Structure formats: C-alpha cells, structure tokens
Image (cartoon, rainbow, N blue to C red):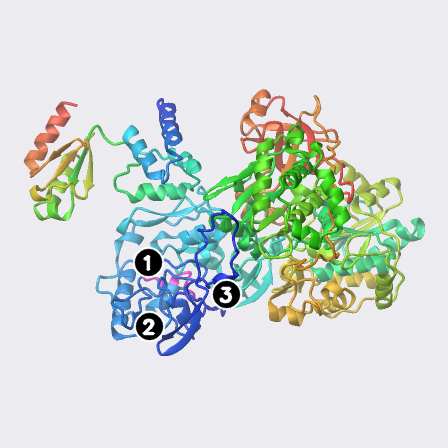
Amino acid sequence: MNAYVKACGETDFGTPQKVPEGTQSAGAGGLCMSGTPLRGQATAILEIDGVSVTVPAGTSLMRAAAEAGVMVPRLCATDSLEAFGSCRLCLVEIEGRRGFPASCTTPAEAGMKVRTQSPQLAKLRRNVMELYISDHPLDCLTCSANGNCELQTMAGVVGLRDVRYGMTGVNHFTDSVTDDSNPYFSFDPGKCIVCNRCVRACEEQQGTFALTISGRGFESRVAAGQSESFMNSECVSCGACVNVCPTATLMEKTVIDKGQAEHSVITTCAYCGVGCGFRAEMQGSDVVRMVPWKDGRANEGHACVKGRFAWGYATHPDRVTKPMIRAKITDPWCEVSWEEALRHTASEFRRIQAKHGRNSIGGIVSSRCTNEEGYLVQKLVRAAFGNNNVDTCARVCHSPTGYGLKQTLGESAGTQTFKSVEKSDVIVVIGANPSDGHPVFASRLKRRVREGAQLIVIDPREIDLVNSPHIKAAHHLKLKPGTNVAVLSAMAHVIVTEGLLDEDFIAERCEDKAFADWREFVVRPTNSPEALEGASGVPAAEVRGAARLYARAGNGAIYYGLGVTEHSQGSTAVIAIANLAMATGNVGREGVGVNPLRGQNNVQGSCDMGSFPHELPGYRHVSDTLTRELFERDWGVVIQPEPGLRIPNMLDAALDGSFLGLYCQGEDPAQSDPNTTHVTAALAAMECVVVQDLFLNETAKYAHVFLPGASFLEKDGTFTNAERRISRVRRVMTPLTGMADWEVTMALSKALGYEMHYAHPSEIMDEIGRLTPTFAGVNYEKLDAAGSLQWPCNDDAPEGTPTMHVGQFVRGKGRFLITQYVPTDEKITRRFPLLLTTGRVLSQYNVGAQTRRTANADFYGADLLEIHPHDAEERGIRDGDRVGVESRVGSTTLPVSITERVQPGVVYTTFHFPESGANVVTTDNSDWATNCPEYKVTAVQVSRLVGA
Amino acid sequence: MENLPAIERTIEAIVAAKQSLPGALLPILHEIQDGLGYIPSESVPRIAKALNLSRAEVHGVITYYQHFRQIPPGRHVLRVCCAEACQAVGGEALAEHARLRLQGSDLTLEPVYCLGLCACGPALQIDETTLHARVTPQKFDALVDALEVDP
C-alpha cells in the first residue's frame, strides 16, 4: 500500500493548492490586499525524477511532485496548512543549485530538474529520522495511532534501522503528563515531535490561536494557552489540531478506547446550516470518530466541536426506540408495536377530521430531517390529510428571509457559496454570531479578515468577531435591539446622498420605478443617520463610516442571521439588506451577495420542499393552478388552493377548538417557540398530538402518540445547507427503532389510506426532481459523483448554481422596496426597563436535545443571563447570582454573568436548557409578513431573588 | 497579594502607553519586566486583548526569550555567561559552583549567552548594572558575600 494514502483513501499533497492569480479578487480602491499571498498567473513546467509536470507557478516542489505521482517524505507538511519547513525530511536536490532545499517551501520554477531520491538524500533523511526517534517512545504496538501514524510511516519510508543516539531521549517523555481535560481528545506531550502542525492548524484553519510553542530548543513544547490545560485555554475544541497531528500526541478518546476504524462512510453533519461533510469512521456499525471531509465543499476539511465530537447522542440511553401511546397526556406511556401506533394515530386523525372538518389537523416538517422526509410530510398533509396545514420551524427563524429575498431578488435563498467570502473585501455581519452559531464558516471569514478584508459588525452585543485574536471590526454598530431597519435605512441614506450608488448596475439590472420610489424614500431627512441616532443608539458618524466602507468595497458581502429575522420588522430588515446589496452592485458574482446564515442543517431544504402552508415544493404558491395540477396528476389527489395554517395559527386554532390533531416531526415547539405558556396551553387543548423525535422532548409532555425517530446516522437522504448545497446523508447504522423517519411517514400515510411507494429515498428525490424545476437535475447518482450540488440544478445549470443572480435577477429585474422603520410594540417601560435578546453558544445547539446529551455540557452546562455591570450594580446583583427575569407574559430564573459585552439596558441569554425557560418570557409579537416571532426583543425586569 | 492592584495599575499604564506602537509586544514586555522585575501571568490576558493577540501567542513570546521571567526574581539577579568563549575558560564550572552556592539564597541565578566580555571570561553580570571579568569561584563567593551582607 502507498504510505502516503491514508486508510480513508485521501491523498495528502503536502502543501495547499495554489490558485492562479487571475481568479483572485480584483481588490478595492485603497483596501489592504497585501495579506493575500501572490500566486503567479503563469504555469511552470518542470521535471521531477524525470517526470514532466505542469503546475501553477508558486506551487511547492512537494505538491508538484505529488501531482506527478512522486511522494516526498515529510512530517511537518500537510496540505491543509501552509508550508513550514521545519522537519527537514522533505529535502530534495535541484540540478544546478547547491545544497538540499526543503521541497515544501521551495516554489516550482520553469525548467527545474528536481531529484527526490539519491543516496545522499536517503542518508540525510535517515539521520533526521534518527534524531526524531531518539526522542520518541517506541511503544508503537500499544499506541493509539498504530495503523495511522505518519511518524511510523516515515520511519518506514526512510528505512530507519538504527538509532545511534539511543532511544531513551529524556526531553519529551519522561517528564510529561497527559492532559485529559478535554472530554473528546487527549494531549500526550511525550509523543510530540514539535512539528507545529497543531499550532498552525489552530491559527490558519480555525483562527483561534489557542496553541503556541513554549520555550525554545530542547525545551520547546506545544502549549495550550499559557501552558495550561486545554480546557482552561482559549481552545474551542474544533479538533483541527487532532486532525493534523501526525502522531498520537493529540488523539480522539474514542480512538484510544476503540482503536482505528476499518471502514468509513461520507456523510453530512446534522447540526447547523453550514452542512459540513464528514467521514464517519466506523468499526462495523459503531462510529469510531467523525472526521471533517477534505472534499466537503462547505467545510473543506474543517469542523467544529458539535459536528466533530458531539455525535454520541445518537446512542444515548435516553433514546426512545419503541412507539408509545396514551389516551390522556396525564396517563403513563404505553409501549406498542409500530402497527398499533400508526393504526391508532390514523384512526384518531380521521375521527377528529370527521367531527371537526378536514382542516382540524396538520403537520410540522422538521428542519433537522432530510429533504426527502420533509417532502413526504408535506405530501402527507396535502395528499392524505387533504389540507395545507403544514409548516416548519423556519417559521420561527428564517421565514422573513424567504419572503424578503423572494420579493426583492426573486429567490428565497442566499446568493453565494461559503467559499465566496474568500473574495470579499468588506464583510458586513449583521444579527449573526458566526463564531458561535456557524463556526466553520466563521473560520473562513476570519481567515479572509486576516488577509486584509474589512469587517463591519452590526449587533447589540460585542460578539467575538468585534475583537478577538487577529480580528478587529472596522466598525461595530452597537445598536439597540429592534432597530436593524433604522440602521440599514440610514446606511442606504448615506449611500444615496453621498453619491455612492452603483448607478450602472441599478440602471441595467433593477426596476426603474421601484428604485426611484426607494431613492425618494431613503433620501428623506428622517432616514439620515443623525435623525435615527436616537432610535438606534448608534452614533451617526459610525453609520456613515460603515456605509461608506461597504459601498466603496470592491466586493461587499452581507452575512446575516436570526438577529435580523426574528423581529417584528424581520422581513423589512431582510428587504433593507437586499436593497443595500442592489444599490451598491454587490450581487451576482463571487465575493459579494446577501447571505442568510441558516440555522439548521436542513432548514433551507425543508423550505425548498414545500413545507410552508402557502407553497408547494420550489416556492410555488398553492393558488397557482398549473403547479397544483402538476402535483395533483402525480399524486392522484386534489390539492386545496388556499394556504393552510401557520404554526402560530395552528396554536391559536387549537385554543379556539378548531385544530385538534398535530403530526410534529423532529421539532420541539414547547421549548423553541416563544411564549411557552401559550404554546403548551394550545398543545394541551389538542386531542391527538403525535411527536416523532429521538428523545421525549418538551412537546412530548403534551403528546398522545410518540413515534421514535432515527438520527442522521441511521438513514439515507440529503440535507441542503445555507448555500443551497444539497449533500448526501448516508446510513452508517441500522435505525435503532427499525424504521427511518421517511419510512414512518410512509407507513402513517398508508394507515390513513393514501399509499406511497418508495423503496429508497433516492426515489423520493427523483419525484422531487420530476415536479420541481429548480431540482430537475438533482438525483443520487449525480450527487454521488459530484459530492454535492447547489440548486438551481436543471438543464440550464446541469452542475448546479454556486452564485445566483449572475447577469440578471431570478425575478428578472431586482426590485427595491421601501423600508420604513417602525419601532416594535415591545417597548421598555418603568416596569420592564431592560431589553432581553437571545442567542446561542458554540458548544450547544438550539434546544440542546442533542448537545446536552454529550460531553458538550462540560463547556456550557447552563444558560446564563448576561447583564452590563451598571445594570447589575443598580440591582445589587453579583456575578453568578441567580436572578428573576420577568416579562409581560411570564417569568423565569437564571444565573447571571456580568459582562460589558452587552450594553447598558440590554440583557442576553441562550435557550439551550429547558429548565431555563427563556421562551417563557418571550412574547408572541411577530414579523408583520411571516409571523416569525420577535425572539430578539422582549422588555423585561431583572431582579435579585429574595433570599439569594 | 496586597500589592496586586498596584501591579495591575502598572501593567495597565504600560499597555495603554505602548499598545499603539508598531510591534508593541516586545516593548511592553520589556517595560513590564523592567518595572516589576518579571511578567506576571495575570498581565498576559490584558496584553493579548490590547494587541489583538491570543494569550497563547503572548505566552509563546515570553517563554521564547530567556530574558523574560515569569516569577519575581530575588533581591539581586546574577547572570553567569554560558556562551562558548566563557565555556572554554571554565564558565560551566563557575555556573555549577554558583548554582550550589545560591541554593536557598534570596539571590537569583540565571544563565546568559554572551555579555561581550569574551576576551576575559568567565563573565558575570549583577543586576544588569555591573559586569565582572575573569570570575573565579572565590571571586564569585566574595561578590555574593558582599551582596548578602549589604543589600
């Protein structure tokens, strides 16, 4: 076997691929682009060991050799990191030059004649290896890296037979203590060869800079933080260091426990909307470890603490594996067979419909399940329930994105690939906290900022991107919660009144009348930064500076999250973002765009699959007769032409007594939806609540039927991430329950008398492609060959569409819309003087159903309320105190963290733990267009608990 | 620990005064060590934040240079030259003698690599103020005796 091809079949080329210069961003006037390494435009033809090879000039000799099929021994080089030149194993000879240059750091030049093997090189390499091994333990047979150790492999490659210095080097392993503080990996400095890969991965790939080399010479040691434990250091446990370690120094504890994998399967992470590709390394049906997939286009070999390590929930003892039913929610659960559970559900649903009408039941599509499963649930509702009462959790997160982007640009999705950020000159992050919520994308973004791109952060809170190692935002617009529209309109005002519009772009690509109306609107003095300063709390000069910087960027890109959408003016803010992008010509090429950072692994997909009550798959309105007829013919049913109920409408109707049955797949509204008291009252009012989930979640407390779900490891399908990328999810173990979720939906449909016939999810995708123009070119065969595809993928774009709106907008002409700032009704009063806003942390995921059941709880074990020192002092609150938080709808208690990250008057918390009840206090205010709840603004009072 | 606030004030003032210098890290570290005799670990987060660095990076620099101390020094610091020229004329033996002589002492012994007295080693520096040439164990003891009697 070739020693350079890992067990998984991936080749390590040693140094990163060089991109020819012509494809780099042109750069912006006056912006610092010096951080970008210059790559020669030309190619170089050279000869390596007699083989002629052509590479972009600037490519390392090591990589050029690898591309010619010649592998040069190396230890410190790996192709995910820039060359470092420290191990001295990759020396080569170049004809006409003296000495033995390191091939990893020597650029290929035209006409070079390189020799990678000679008696002298062999001797040198063996000598170098001797020095390494004199200082490395020889416990190979019992070492956890055995079978996958680059040091061992290189010792073999160079033919090491003897170590003249003895093999009892004292420097590294006699005094070393293994650091087991991290729950997922251990650090054994005794095995370290100080190749610096881990330090460089932490810097280059992850961008955290948590590792260093302490000391010098023989005293050089890899150190976390200030030579402390990994857990106490700045480490965020992304696993990049573990991934690149060539020895067993940094090793996954699961590998130490179980040994090396014997096979692996490529699949897609089931946490956030980044949608990282992973290689599930397996022993039989046991996962040994999840390794980020180098060819996964969303992540390119990087990962975060959730996807990389927090997969143990899949086999957690809390998993329910048998269906259960009960007559009343106060009764104990009773385990039954699948047949009985489904028969019972079907008969209850039909009973309710017979008594209360066809529209008295509905379903919720999960954004955590696959596209195929989402498609089936909406099909079940439309075809078997016979109504359009289907909705998804995007209702409570990015529904304003769907609406706002459709209205302005013509498509309900982000415009770019994640990789696009590598060509941005100015990056605006608004209402998003990527380093916690979308960490793998944040690493890309931070890398671009380190290369010289400028960053503008618009957020009420000082998120990590404002100021962290090697990252400093040029502007932080620290606005009051609920005033995004004021700030965005003010930025538009500056762009128009200061002559910063891209007039050519607008004239060519946007609707004249709509633009003229918008222009007339934004130039009004009431939209100036000065006029809106009082409302937003952002100094006018900061707004002007940020607007100028963005407008003058060669490539300006906007990334936004739920801090934009989850507001009473969520849709307006999305529209305002699209307006800014159109006004400055920042749409339709790489490096620019409007980029929603979607929350869940498949929230883009669940929306695409027609899980909204008003839209069939592909965002086509149910009132459109032609579309309806298309589905009616294929499904053999009549589809209702009127939109069905949204989740909030379902809940209201439940309290009215007109909505009594709910099929809720993979969602937990009782914890995740606002105003918990209202949600639970509605659920309690229903006659048949069916919950399909991995665990007995909060909603299951109100359920009459529990159908056990299958994790992403147990099924085939696809997820669609925030960049519209459809990636395969592959089954690595059989479902613990016996059935994958799509099979359960099919069986339920059958029990309801509407049979569906699919032998495999690929057949569901074939149907989706047949009925949905944007997916026409998507099928499993093509996905398997391409790795992933970005929709639209059809005859017009057979390989998919990485960048949208190139040349023209999907809707034809881009449409500017007026964005009048209207303050939210949720105002501070004497009784509720603080504004509560919510977010999430890196280690926990949403309602925490999965992450709480992993060692991620070691990183963040309880929700905290962040409060500014002034507000804390005024209330006599000390750090760590438990305080009462009360809004007009409810109250809860939380431990306090006093910090200047939040501004005075604003408090902040997360909603990962059910006992915290963050959503007990959030209200049912919602977006005017889509009913997306206003999670981000709740007027509250915080007070010391009596006796605390 | 009574003087911790004073130390914090010193660090704060040094960081504030120097943070906008190009390449501010080394000047800040030098000034803190000059002012306090060492670089307290508590100063690292403050320096890192001000310079947009990680704690690990600052720590890496501090530990890389022999010059920087992480613990307070004794009453006086004695540096014995361990570079090649001094080694050739008994520097190592002097260093070993010094190590034994100063065990339990409140004086600090540090190696140094060249004091520029290569022609007349072994060389010794006391408190970065005085240099001594051709230092023998006897001469070393006399110097130490004087330091111990007369602070």
Distance between mark 1 and mark 3 Cα atoms = 30 Å
The answer to whether one can see residue A322 in this image is no
Magenta stretch in the rendered image: A138-148
In the picture provided, is A490 more to the left or to the right than A242?
right
With respect to residue A689, does A861 lie above or below? above
Mark 1 and mark 2: span between their CA atoms? 18 Å
> Which quarter of the rendering shows the N terminus of chain B?
top left
**Is A145 covered by the magenta stretch?**
yes
Looking at numbered disc 2 in the image, what kind of residue is underneath it?
Thr
Magenta span contains residue A245: no
Check disc 1 and report the residue beneath it: A86
Give the quadrant of the C terminus of chain B.
Answer: top left
* Chain of residue at mark 1: A
Residue at disc 3, secondary structure: loop
Q: Residue B61's x, y, as percent?
A: 33, 43
On the image, numbered disc 3 is attached to which residue?
A261
- Residue A341, numbered circle: none
Q: Quadrant of residue A895?
A: top right
Tell me which amino acid carries mark 1.
Ser
Tell me, yes or no, whether the two marked residues, 1 and 3, touch with CB atoms within 8 Å. no
Q: Nearer the viewer, residue A83 or A40?
A: A40
Judge left or right: residue A659 versus residue A163: right
Question: Position of A588 compared to B31: left or right?
Answer: right
Q: Chain of mark 2?
A: A
Secondary structure beneath dot 2 equals loop
**Picture layout, residue A209 above or below residue A779:** above
